[in-house]
Image (cartoon, grey):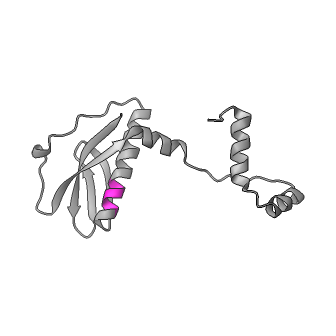
Amino acid sequence: MEKYIYPAVFSYEEVIYIRFPDFPECVSDAECETEAYSNAKEILELWLYDMECRGISFPRKSVLKDIPLSDNEILVLIEVSMPVVRDKVKNIYVKKTLTIPKWLDELGKAENVNFSLLLQNALKEYLGENK
C-alpha cells in the first residue's frame, strides 16, 4: 500500500505551529494538539497529492534523531495513505446552480426527492461512470 510517514515538528507558542523538515514550505498551525494532528495530516495529504499530480518524487524521510528541536518543540509522525487521499480529492463536492420547471420542483419535493443524489446518479449513468 502507498503509505508514507513523515516527521512534523509542533512548536508551542501562542498557537501550535506545524512544520515538516522534509517539506520546508509545508506549514500550518492550530489552537490545540487535536487540531494540530488533524491539520498536519491534512496539509501533508494535500502537499503529497500536489507533488504526485506534478510528477515530483517524494523525498526520503529525515532521520528522526538528526532533526534539531527547540525546548518548545516536539516531533510527531504523520501517516498518509495516498489511495485514501486520491479518493477524498475525487469526492470533493462542488455546488452547481441549475434551473428546473416549477412543477417538477414541487413534484420532487412532494416525493422527498434528493435532487443532488438523483442528478449525480443520472450524470454517472449518462457519462458511463457507474462504478
Instruction: Give me the residue at 70% from left, 43% from top.
Output: 121
- Please state which of residues 29 and 87 is positioned toward the viewer in this rendering: 87
- The x, y position of residue 20, in whole percent, is 25, 48
Give above or below for 30 relative to 50.
below
Magenta part mainly helix, strand or loop? helix
> Would residue 68 be visible to someone looking at this image?
yes
Instruction: Give me the residue at 26% from left, 52% from top.
Output: 19
Q: Quadrant of residue 127?
A: top right
Instruction: Give me the residue at 13% from left, 47% from top.
Output: 67
- The x, y position of residue 33, in whole percent, is 28, 64
Region rendered in magenta: 35-40
- The x, y position of residue 24, in whole percent, is 26, 45
- The x, y position of residue 119, in whole percent, is 73, 47
> Would residue 97 be visible to someone looking at this image?
no
Q: Is residue 36 magenta?
A: yes
Q: Is residue 14 left or right of residue 107?
A: left
- Please state which of residues 56 and 63 is positioned toward the viewer in this rendering: 63
- Please state which of residues 20 and 85 is positioned toward the viewer in this rendering: 85
Give above or below for 36 relative to 3.
below
Q: Quadrant of the N terminus?
A: top left
